[in-house]
Structure formats: structure tokens, C-alpha cells
Image (cartoon, rainbow, N blue to C red):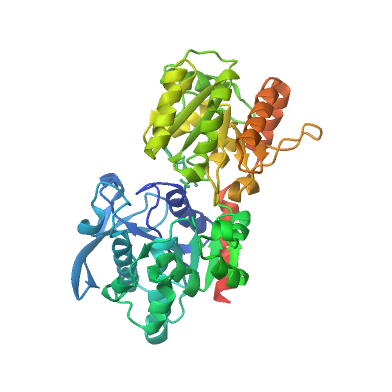
């Protein structure tokens, strides 16, 4: 089976969040289970030159907006599987990956260029695996082309939702510029008087998936459907949830090159060295018995920062260290800074994005808090589990699927989990975790339950293969 994965970001070429991790790792995992896959992603200004192995296509002439866009395509296998990176400087050589008023045009172009490239490089894929709103355009183009272009006749589409909250809305009046002028295409995009790339992908793709089982149900509700819950309900028999995997070649405390010392479930000594290293990195006094509660995230409302703001003072008074790595909305950045000013001997803050620091925090912290409002899958809780860092999460989306609440009577559970989006419920779980931390045997049991959980990509890749087969049937 031949699969083409198309994504707006993919590790190591680009990443702003979980989509990048998933799109980078899935093709490699598919290859490992015998699937012939190719990844197509843009070449951004941020994509490191060392990852661009060679120029595969010098003259990828893309028919675009009535003319020809002279793009190029680089080739690489830096993510462990064949990848083409579309180089279109006016669209992708910018200061950031997203955030421009014409993002819809940038990704409409990317989608069309990806299809042009696939036709250029050989036989059509049987599965076109599209990801998030950025790929809604290709879903429609494929559905249209299948009717008259024999090249695409046997290609089927799978559309994966990584975050329903971002829908790629724009004015209907622009559709014709991107080649979408048929009634079919206009109808597919049309949503409340606008055009929505997410809606188009959901409506016309052959099969739908999302990144956890619980989220597959949540996006069928008014609360998490962002106006499209009627459509996900309508297509529920074609929608499945597959929990993301973790790339254990990148996130493995026994081999992670970023760590001060290595450790594993059988030998935890190194975790103490990592804790010391982390405290020193943040210029905090080294008191090894004080627990570290950490957070790494994009600072947006989705991630439950409002709940953290409400209880941060209590956590500090309870005696724990608090460490935050993240950037985003100013009010949240200001909050972390003011907490640091309030308790400089207990609070460490790094405003920005740092992959190496993310690894050191996962290894050195004792607990990881993730009280998200909604969380399609979430990756950090899974990294935490593997690094013996106990997650404290809200029971939503993938957090609910991957974290089980600690049960002291039976000795089961790998973390602490609360339900309602309320600061008092969150604080209760923090106190429970601090209490459990006080008993080394209990703590070690919780850590071991987490470290032995298998969230590998191999499991997830096999489920995707089943989905692809199901789609072709
Ligand atoms: P989302 O995709 O909603 O941002 P996920 O938990 O699925 O959330 O994935 C977030 C990914 O981005 C994780 O790999 C996390 O470590 C990483 N990340 C987020 N913010 C930062 C940051 N400031 N520095 C380093 N890594 C970050």
C-alpha cells in the first residue's frame, strides 16, 4: 500500500505543536510496519538546511492563480522516511510558520503543489492522508479530480483532526482564485456565510480520524465541535479515534542526549541528577526533597492556564517548586513572570520555545500539570509518563485516554486526574499528588505504572493501517 501523508508541519523540519510531532513520526512508523509512505510538507525559513538533503525537483511549475508558480522540492529522510519539502519562498520563507491573514492561500497553494508533486513523482498513492484544516483544500481537489483524471481514480482520502478549534476560515469570494469554482467545491467549503477548510475536509474526505478515542466523541458535541458537531455526528460512522504515539527514539530517558544523566524503570538513580541539573538551570536552590511541578506548553486558554493562575499561590505555599516553559498570550506570560517575581527561590520560568529544555524538564521534574480545557491528544503527558514524571491532568480528550487516576487501594494508576474545569478540583489533585510524593514507595509505584505503559508509535501505526485498509474497502 502506498500512502502520502500531507502536513503543514512535521518534525524535524518544522514544529509548533503536536501536529508536527505526529506528522514527523507517523511515516517512519508506517515504514516500520511495511507501508510505503511519503511525507509532503512545506520548506519554511525555520527548516534547517542540514535537513534538506538534495533538490529533488528544480522546476515544480505549479499552475496557480492563472499563472505558474516556479516552486522547487527538496528531498530528505531526516525524519526516517522519504520526505519532499515544497519550497515556495513567497509563501513559506517568513518569520513564523502561521499567523498571516492569507494563511488560507498559503496552504491552498501548498495542497495544490503537493498534488502536482505526487503526479510528477510516480504512481498515485492509494491513500492521501490529510491533516487538519491546512489540508482541507487537497480533500476537495482530490474528490473533484477523481471524477475525470484517471491518475487519481483509485486514491482515497483520510482526514485527521488534530485540533477542531482551528478551522481555517476565509471569505467565500476567494475560492475561485484557488481553482474552486464548481458547485460541489463551493458547497463543501461553505460554512455560515464563509469558507471553512476544516469543514471541507470533514465533508468530502472518504474517512475521518482524530487523535484520541475520547476526542472522537467530544467533537460530536456542541461544546467541542466549534459549530461543526452536526457534521461530525453525521459522519460518525466514518470517524475513529487513534491515540497518538510517542517517538521513543526521541523521548527515551535511557538514551536522551539532552539529559545530564540517563535512567530507566530499572535504574532510577539518574533522575536525581536530572533534577539537580534542572534546578541549577533555573538558578533555583537545590533542595532535592522538594517536588518540582512543571508545565511545558503553548500559553493559550486551551491549556488551562487560567486554572494554574488561580492556584499557583497555593502550590508555592505548599512548598513545591514550579517550573514553566512556554510562550504565547501576553497575559499568561505576564502571570508566569509575576509568579517568579513573587517566589524567586521556588519558581523558574523560561519564556520561549526550547526543545532541549523541554527534554531536561521532563526528566528533572517530579510532576507535570496539564489541566487543559480541551486536549485532542496531548503529548507531554505521555512524555512525562515515560520519564517517571507523574502527570496531573484534567479528564478530557487524550489526557483521559492515557492517564489513569492513582488508586492507593489497588496500586493501579499512573497519575492524578480530575473532571470539572474548576480550580478547586485541580488543587485537590495537586494536594493528593504532593501527599503521595511524601511516601517513596507509593511514588515509585505510580512512576513505574507510568514508565511501563506502552504508547509507542508501532501500536498507533497498526491502527492507521487498519483504517487505510478499511478506507480502501
Ligand atoms: P499542542 O499540539 O496543542 O500544542 P501537544 O501536547 O499535542 O499540544 O504537543 C505540544 C508539543 O509541543 C509537545 O511536543 C511539547 O513538548 C511541545 N512544546 C510546546 N511548547 C513548547 C515550548 N515552549 N518549548 C518546547 N516545546 C514545546
Q: Is residue 15 left or right of residue 424?
A: left
Q: In this view, does 280 lie to the left or right of 115?
A: right
The answer to whether residue 253 of the structure is visible from this angle is: no
Ligand 1, seen in the image, is in the quarter at: top left
- Tell me which residue sits at (39%, 46%) in the image: 16
- Tell me which residue sits at (40%, 33%) in the image: 333
Residue 247, x across and y down, in percent:
51, 45
Residue 188's image quarter? Answer: bottom left
Q: Residue furthest right?
A: 409
Seen from the viewer's position, the closer of residues 230 and 362 is 230
Q: Which residue lies furthest to the bottom in this view?
A: 148
The answer to whether residue 91 of the structure is visible from this angle is: yes
Residue 121, x across and y down, in percent:
32, 70
Residue 391, x across and y down, in percent:
60, 35
Seen from the viewer's position, the closer of residues 435 and 71 is 435
Seen from the viewer's position, the closer of residues 175 and 40 is 175
Residue 384, x across and y down, in percent:
56, 36
Q: In this view, does 472 lie above or below 259?
A: below
Q: Is residue 320 above or below residue 462?
A: above
- Tell me which residue sits at (46%, 57%) in the image: 27
Total numbered labels placed on residues in the image = 0
Name the quarter where the C terminus is drawn: bottom right
Seen from the viewer's position, the closer of residues 119 and 206 is 206
- Tell me which residue sits at (40%, 71%) in the image: 193
Amino acid at each position: 500500500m502506498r500512502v502520502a501523508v500531507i502536513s503543514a508541519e512535521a518534525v524535524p523540519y518544522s514544529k509548533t505543536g503536536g501536529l508536527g510531532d505526529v506528522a514527523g513520526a507517523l511515516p517512519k512508523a508506517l515504514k516500520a510496519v511495511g507501508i510505503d509512505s511519503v511525507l509532503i510538507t512545506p520548506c519554511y525559513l525555520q527548516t534547517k538546511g542540514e535537513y534538506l538533503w538534495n533538490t529533488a525537483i528544480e522546476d515544480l511549475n505549479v499552475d496557480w492563480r492563472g499563472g505558474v508558480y516556479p516552486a522547487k522540492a527538496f528531498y530528505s529522510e531526516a525524519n526516517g522516511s522519504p520526505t519532499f519539502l515544497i519550497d515556495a519562498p513567497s509563501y513559506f520563507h517568513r518569520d513564523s510558520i502561521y499567523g498571516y491573514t492569507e494563511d488560507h492561500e498559503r496552504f491552498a497553494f501548498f495542497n495544490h503543489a503537493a498534488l502536482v508533486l505526487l503526479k510528477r513523482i510516480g504512481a498515485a498513492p492509494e491513500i492521501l492522508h490529510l491533516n487538519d484544516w491546512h489540508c482541507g483544500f487537497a480533500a476537495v481537489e482530490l474528490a473533484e479530480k477523481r471524477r475525470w483524471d484517471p491518475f487519481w481514480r483509485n486514491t482515497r482520502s483520510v482526514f485527521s483532526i488534530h485540533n477542531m478549534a482551528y478551522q481555517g476560515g476565509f471569505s467565500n469570494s476567494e475560492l475561485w482564485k484557488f481553482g474552486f469554482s464548481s458547485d460541489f467545491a463551493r458547497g463543501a467549503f461553505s460554512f455560515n456565510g464563509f469558507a471553512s477548510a476544516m469543514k471541507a475536509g470533514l465533508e468530502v474526505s472518504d474517512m475521518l480520524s482524530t487523535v484520541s478515542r475520547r476526542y472522537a466523541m467530544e467533537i460530536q458535541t456542541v461544546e467541542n465541535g466549534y459549530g461543526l458537531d452536526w457534521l461530525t455526528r453525521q459522519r460518525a460512522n466514518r470517524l475513529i479515534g487513534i491515540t497518538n504515539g510517542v517517538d521513543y527514539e526521541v523521548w527515551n530517558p535511557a538514551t536522551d542526549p539532552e539529559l545530564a544523566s540517563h535512567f530507566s524503570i530499572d535504574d532510577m538513580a539518574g533522575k536525581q541528577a536530572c533534577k539537580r541539573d534542572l534546578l541549577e538551570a533555573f538558578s533555583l536552590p537545590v533542595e532535592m526533597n522538594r517536588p518540582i511541578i512543571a508545565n511545558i506548553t503553548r500559553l493559550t486558554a486551551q491549556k488551562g492556564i487560567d486554572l494554574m493562575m488561580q492556584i499557583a499561590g497555593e502550590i508555592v505555599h505548599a512548598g513545591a517548586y514550579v517550573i514553566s516553559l512556554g510562550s504565547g498570550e501576553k497575559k499568561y506570560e505576564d502571570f508566569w513572570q509575576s509568579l517568579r517575581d513573587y517566589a524567586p527561590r521556588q519558581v523558574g520560568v523560561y519564556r520561549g520555545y526550547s526543545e532541549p529544555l523541554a527534554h531536561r524538564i521532563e526528566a528533572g521534574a517530579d510532576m507535570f500539570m496539564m489541566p487543559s480545557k480541551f486536549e485532542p491528544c496531548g503529548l507531554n503527558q505521555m512524555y512525562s509518563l515515560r520519564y517517571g514524571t507523574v502527570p496531573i491532568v484534567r479528564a478530557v480528550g487524550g489526557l483521559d485516554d492515557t492517564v489513569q487516576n492513582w488508586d492507593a487501594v489497588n496500586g493501579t494508576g499512573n497519575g492524578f486526574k480530575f473532571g470539572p474545569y474548576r480550580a478547586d478540583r485541580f488543587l485537590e489533585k495537586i494536594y493528593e499528588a504532593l501527599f503521595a510524593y511524601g511516601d517513596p514507595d507509593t511514588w515509585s509505584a505510580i512512576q513505574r505504572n507510568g514508565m511501563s505503559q506502552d504508547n509507542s508509535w508501532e501500536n498507533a501505526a497498526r491502527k492507521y493501517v487498519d483504517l487505510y485498509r478499511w478506507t480502501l474497502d
